[in-house]
Image: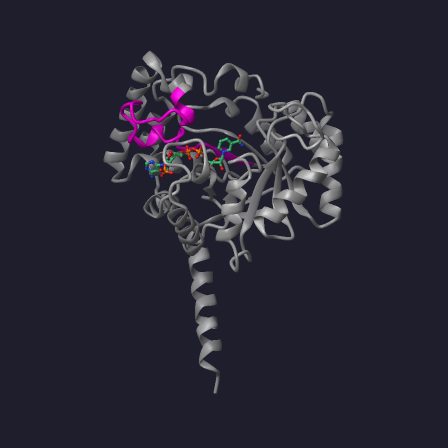
Amino acid sequence: MEAPARSGTAIRDREAEKRRKAVKHVKLGDLEVSRIGLGAMGMSTAYAGAGTDEAESIRAIHRALELGVTFLDTAEVYGPYTNEELVGRALRGRREGVVLATKFGFISHTGRPSGQLDSSPAGIRTAVEGSLKRLGTDHIDLYYQHRVDPLVPIEDTTGALAELITQGKIRHIGLSEAGPETIRRAHAVHPVTAVQSEYSLWTRDPEARVLPLLRELNIGFVPYSPLGHGFLTGTIRSTDDFDATDWRKNNPRFTGENFQRNLRIADEVQAIADQARATPAQIALAWLLTRGENIAPIPGTKRVARVEENTAADTIDLTPEQLERLDHLTPASGETHDEAAMNQLER
Ligand SMILES: NC(=O)c1ccc[n+]([C@@H]2O[C@H](COP(=O)([O-])OP(=O)(O)OC[C@H]3O[C@@H](n4cnc5c(N)ncnc54)[C@H](OP(=O)(O)O)[C@@H]3O)[C@@H](O)[C@H]2O)c1
């Protein structure tokens, strides 16, 4: 007779497998991920309430895994460091089957002044050791350069990353907010698996040049801030609730007249959500999923209920008429970042 503990494990494995199949998967290059991921940044930094409830953040990660979300996103600079530590704690004993993505390049490990990007090979070799340790893992599945470093040729950065693949420390290479020329040059040194850039109903920049190139090169795309930093969910009607540490407090889209004008966009998304019997967050994600085959957005939340809500966007089919309306929302007022941060984006 089979030992009860063993059959219990077998049942759990079968259940986990069933749930994994519930969320659809896509390929980023040759890396398979759930097509809705989970961004962990806001659990530790950037938005109101970050870092205030670690237990709920960990429950949110566990719930995502239970629902079949396999794709988790963090970065060395979130915190800094504390977000990777949190994700590492959440994944203790649950690492298998997870596609763990993190990023380097905002923090210098070679003595560059604070605030200066650093994608030098020496910097990367130090950064990866720290990330592995904080994440409590022996490999990172997808390791992104967080921003293109103007002082280091992308060939040198990609070469260093290719060495980390050979050493088994990372499995795949990613770029974030890189422009077409950089993507091509990096890809010529070693296949790039995914590019992660801001993309959502109110930030459509990648459509003109980046998305066509990624299709051509078979590189996956990971839209970050797919809910427009929360704005597209319709829950932000005033900026008074943002405390001084909230990144949105000084963001051009969330301030002054721009914010007032942008409320119209949230209303338009809400109207379509009402018609589709979904939430605005789900509509924003479902729309992204129609934008290509190899797209996996990473909505960020630190709450279990919102993980459930966002993951369910995978099941929503938008009608052609709804897609048409979403395609022609009122254009956003204001840049996506302040001037200094805009200068770090390749467009
Ligand atoms: N590569 C890069 O440079 C870069 C830059 C930014 C972000 N990212 C990555 O992308 C991930 C997602 O982006 P993001 O967090 O900036 O923005 P987002 O996913 O567009 O929005 C996150 C915000 O929306 C709220 N939210 C989430 N689900 C909601 C729902 N169903 N209803 C109402 N509000 C909801 C969250 O609040 P609660 O947490 O309170 O639910 C949070 O304030 C990040 O976690 C990070 O991993 C990468």
Q: How many marks?
A: 0
Q: In this image, 161 relative to 56: left or right? A: right
Q: Is residue 343 magenta?
A: no
x and y, in percent, of residue 314 in the image: 39, 45
Image-quarter location of ligand 1: top left
Residue at figure coordinates x 75%, y 29% from the top left: 155
Q: Is residue 328 above or below residue 79?
A: above
Residue drawn at (74%, 49%), measured in percent from left and top?
A: 167
Instruction: State whether residue 192 is above or below residue 183.
Output: below
Left or right: residue 290 compared with residue 259:
right
Name the residue nearer the viewer: 227 or 149: 149
Name the residue at the bottom extreme: 1
- Location of residue 38 (image quadrant): top left
- List x then y, in percent, for residue 334: 41, 15
Is residue 165 rendered to the left or right of residue 178? Answer: right
Highlighted magenta segment, given as a residue range: 221-249
